[in-house]
Amino acid sequence: MDAIRTESLTKSYGRARGVVDLDLSVPSGTIFGFLGPNGAGKTTTIRILLDFLRPTSGDAVVLGLDSRRDSVEIHRRIGYLPGDPALYDRITGRDLLDWLGRLRGGVDRPYLDALIERFAIDPDRPIRQLSRGNRQKIAVVQAFMHRPELLVLDEPTSGLDPLVQHEFQELCRETTASGATVFLSSHVLDEVQHLCDHVAIIREGRLVAIEDVDAIRARAVRDVTIRFAGSFDADAFAALAGVRSVTVEGPVLHLQLSGNADPLVKLAAQHDVVDLVSAPADLDDLFLHYYEGEESNGAARH
C-alpha cells in the first residue's frame, strides 16, 4: 500500500491554480522527495493531504485513509513539520514537547530524551530566547518523537547548520529502516539527491516527473571552476562526456558538468591544480530540462 496517493488533485484560487491534476504515489517505507522551486505548489499539496485546505477537485489518500473524512485519524498517525513552524514561545522547549506528547497520548520518554541530546537542544530555555536554528531543531524533534508511521516534512532543514542537517538525514534513514515513510518537501536539489529514494518534481502546480535519484543525478548540471598552476588543454576537457559550456580565463577553466565527475577529476589530476570548485546543480536548469519540450507547446502554463 502507498503511504500517500492522490488522483487528479486540484486546488484553484480564483483564476490561479495552486495544484493542477496531481497524480502522486508515495511508496511505503521510502524517503520520497517532493522537489520544486518556491511557489511551485508543494505546501499547498501538503495542506490538502492534512486537510488544512480542501481541494477544488480530486482525491487524496493518506495511510489508506481519506484525507478529508479521516483527517483526525491521519493526524494521530503522522508527524508533521510545517515550512515555517510557529512555536508557542512563552514556555520552554521541554514544556512544549511534553505538552505535545500528552496530546498524542504519551511518547517514549527515553526516545524523546535521546532526540533532545542528539540535536543538542537546551530544553529548559524559553523558546523565545532560542535562535531560528534551535527553534527548528525543536520542531524536528516534535515531528519524530512519537515514532509516527508517516513523516510529512515541509522544508525541514531550513535554518539548520550542516552538522545538524547531517544528523537529520541519519534520523530519516533510521526512520524508514524501521518501516515508516518520509515525505520531504524541498527546493534544495542537493539535499534531495543525498537523502531520497525517489523524487517527484513539481513546477507551477503541475507534476513534471517522478524519477529515482540516479536519474536526477544524471540530469543535474554542476558549474565547475578549476584554477591551474600551469598550462592545460581546454579541448581535452571539452571532449569529456557530460562537459559543456567550456570557457577559459587565463589559468582558470570554467565548465558545466552533468553525470559522472570521475573522468573530469582524473584529467584535472594530470595537471597542477591550485583550486577546484563544484557548485551544486542549479534547480532552474534542471526544470528547464524537464520543461523544454512542454513550454514550446504552451504546456503547463496557466
Image (spheres, helix red, strand yellow):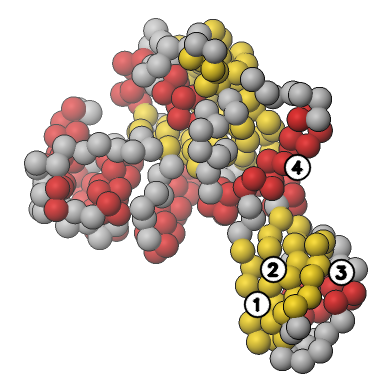
What residue do we see at 78% from left, 29% from top?
A: 294
Residue 283: x and y in percent read: 62, 47
What's the residue type where badge 2 is placed?
Val
- Quadrant in the rendering for residue 256: bottom right
Indicate which disc, 4 or 3, sits on the residue closer to the N terminus.
Answer: 3
Amino acid type at circle 3 is Ala
Q: Can you identify the residue that label 2 sits on?
A: 224
Residue type highlighted by circle 1: Leu
- Write the residue at 78% across / 88% down: 271
- Is residue 183 left or right of 113 when viewed as pictured? right
Above or below for 16 versus 219: above
Q: Tell me, yes or no, whether the two marked residues, 1 and 2, touch with CB atoms within 8 Å.
A: yes
Residue 36 showing in the rendered view:
yes
Q: In which quarter of the image is the C terminus?
A: top right
Q: How far apart are marks 4 and 2 (CA)?
A: 19 Å
Mark carried by residue 238: 3
Where disc 4 sits, the SS reads helix
207 or 32: nearer the viewer: 207
Label 4, residues with CA under 10 Å away: few <14, some 14-19, many ≥20: few
Q: Mark 1 points at which residue?
A: 276
Which residue occupies 86% across, 69% down? 238
Q: Is residue 281 left or right of residue 50?
A: right
- Which of the two discs, 1 and 4, labels the residue nearer the N terminus? 1
Which one is in front, 17 or 5? 17
Relative to 4, say whether 217 is above or below. Answer: below
Q: Give the x, y percent position of residue 265.
A: 74, 75
Whole-percent x, y for residue 267 in the image: 81, 79
Q: Do the residues labelled 1 and 4 touch (CB within 8 Å)?
A: no
Compared with 242, 74 (above or below) is above
> Is 257 placed above or below 116 here?
below
Residue that numbered label 4 is attached to:
289
